Amino acid sequence: MAQQDFIVIKAQQDGVNVIGLTRGDHTKFHHTEKLDAGEVLVAQFTEHTSAIKIRGDAEIHTSHGVVKSDSKK
């Protein structure tokens, strides 16, 4: 398998949820993490992970640039 790019998720507030979603015929949640302010998670897409959902205020650093998610208001 070719090396995949990593993404870096930095929580800007307590309680940021990072949810991994599966690949295949039926998309399902397969992994969750909860980050507090300042915590960083390094993640990547794999043969099992086709999407990553982020809930809460966070910075997402990718090879394409930086994206910010917002918390619900």
Image: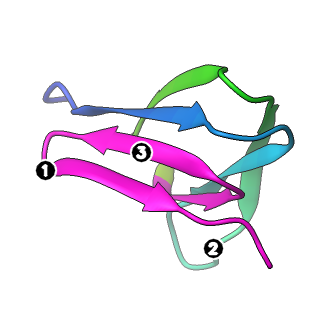
| Residues packed near mark 2 inside 10 Å, few (<14), some (14 to 19) or many (20 plus) | few
**Left or right, 55 with reference to 63:** right
Whole-percent x and y of residue 24?
Answer: 51, 69
Residue at 61% in and 66% down: 70
| Quadrant location, the N terminus | top left
| Residue 48 appears anywhere in the view | no
| Labelled disc at residue 72 | none
Identify the residue position indicated by label 1 in the image.
Answer: 64
| Labelled disc at residue 27 | 2
Residue at 44% in and 57% down: 68
Residue at 25% in and 41% down: 62
**Left or right, 13 with reference to 41:** right
Residue at 54% in and 32% down: 10
Identify the residue position indicated by label 3 in the image.
Answer: 60
Q: How is the image coloured?
A: rainbow
**Dominant secondary-structure state across the stretch colored magenta:** strand
| Quadrant location, the C terminus | bottom right
| Residues packed near mark 1 inside 10 Å, few (<14), some (14 to 19) or many (20 plus) | few
Of residues 41 and 36, the one drawn nearer to the viewer in this rendering: 36
Q: Is 54 inside the magenta-drawn segment?
A: yes
Residue farthest along the front direction in this orientation: 73
In the figure, residue 57 lies in which quadrant? bottom right
| Residue 30 appears anywhere in the view | yes
The range drawn in magenta is 50-73
Of residues 61 and 47, the one drawn nearer to the viewer in this rendering: 61
Alpha carbon separation for disc pair 1 and 3: 10 Å
Alpha carbon separation for disc pair 2 and 1: 25 Å
Secondary structure, mark 1, is loop
**Labels 3, 2: front one:** 3
Secondary structure, mark 2, is loop
